[in-house]
Amino acid sequence: MQLPAFDLPEGIAAEHLHAGPTFADAVAPSLGIACLEAPPTWLADLPREVVGRTITAMPIRDAWTLRYPAFIKAPNDKSLRAMVYTDGTRLPGADAVDLDTLVLVAEIVSFTAEFRLYALDGTIHTSSQYSAHGGRCLAPLPDDVASAAAALIRDLAETLPSAIVVDVGLLDDRLVVIEANAAWASGTYACDVDRALDVILRAAGPVAGLLRRDEAFTRPVPGQPSSQGTRRTISEPARAATVAHREPPPSEARPARR
């Protein structure tokens, strides 16, 4: 079922969703859906040799004082526009965002190619190239990248939920991590859609079916304390979202594969 707004039809019983973070925050708790995501400082905590650049996590109040260009983004939301800011004064101000909102400040680099990896239980379940030299390029994962990508996902598995999307890129002919994205909020590019859905269903499913190892990777419920110490106050445009649903008992139809 595709929904045009945040209002859920009366009586709906959903088990999974694929949507933007704002929609997930609005509906997942009431539906009993646990949404998995990487820890907010995950990217900044990785060694430089894994990411190929300097990345620092800081509250936005500190980022406001920066006086040099940097690529700045929010860790797990699209509410703050991810882009190169000429300095910290270009960021949203105190009238739009909480002072303690966490942001990632990264050294500016250029990737020669970028790839999306849908990972399930520490292995690549499906993958796609999506960029080359800064332009859109949809293609299968090249053979000469596949083995390095598989090793990277295997090495990072313990630091991530069991179902996640990891974007990687070629930087000076070396494969490095670009970022991690929640599978329930990611596009599939040229990935195998059925196999991507396997990952999405695990990444946003019933709380009752949550794996013990994934309990530490659930997205915080708005209004409850989170490890980020942030408040999501920058508005995200409402967009259509999809829930995989079942009819109320006695019928127990499973979500469709497509």
Image: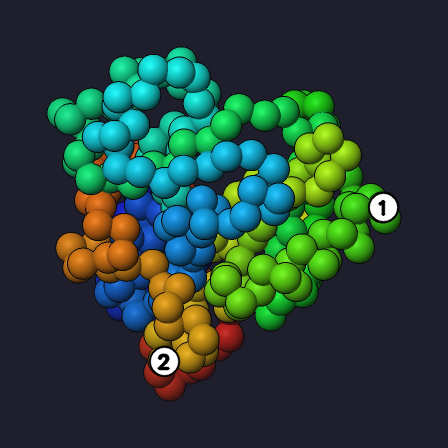
> Could you tell me how far apart the alpha carbons at marks 2 and 1 are, in whole angstroms?
40 Å
- Tag 2: residue type? Ala
Q: How is the image coloured?
A: rainbow
**Is there any visible trace of residue 186 in the rendered image?**
no
Front-lying residue, 234 or 173: 173
Q: Quadrant of the N terminus?
A: bottom left
Front-lying residue, 170 or 212: 170
- Across and down, in percent, residue 11 comes to 27, 68
In the shown orientation, is residue 182 left or right of residue 250? right
* Image height of 166 relative to 98, above or below: below
- Across and down, in percent, residue 152 comes to 67, 55
**Is there any visible trace of residue 23 in the rendered image?**
yes
- The residue at which mark 1 appears reads as 144
Q: Residue at position x 17%, y 34% from top?
A: 99
Q: Nearer the viewer, mark 2 or mark 1?
A: 1
- The dot on residue 208 is 2
* Image height of 106 relative to 232, above or below: above
Residue at far right of view: 143
Q: Quadrant of the C terminus?
A: bottom right
In the shown orientation, is residue 19 left or right of residue 254? left
Q: Residue at position x 86%, y 48% from top?
A: 143
- Tag 1: residue type? Asp
Give the secondary structure at mark 2: helix
In the shown orientation, is residue 213 left or right of residue 231? right
In the shown orientation, is residue 130 left or right of residue 228? right
Mark 1 surroundings: few (<14), some (14-19) or many (≥20) residues within 10 A: few
Give the secondary structure at mark 1: helix
Mark 2 surroundings: few (<14), some (14-19) or many (≥20) residues within 10 A: few
- Across and down, in percent, residue 21 comes to 36, 47
* Image height of 44 relative to 80, above or below: below
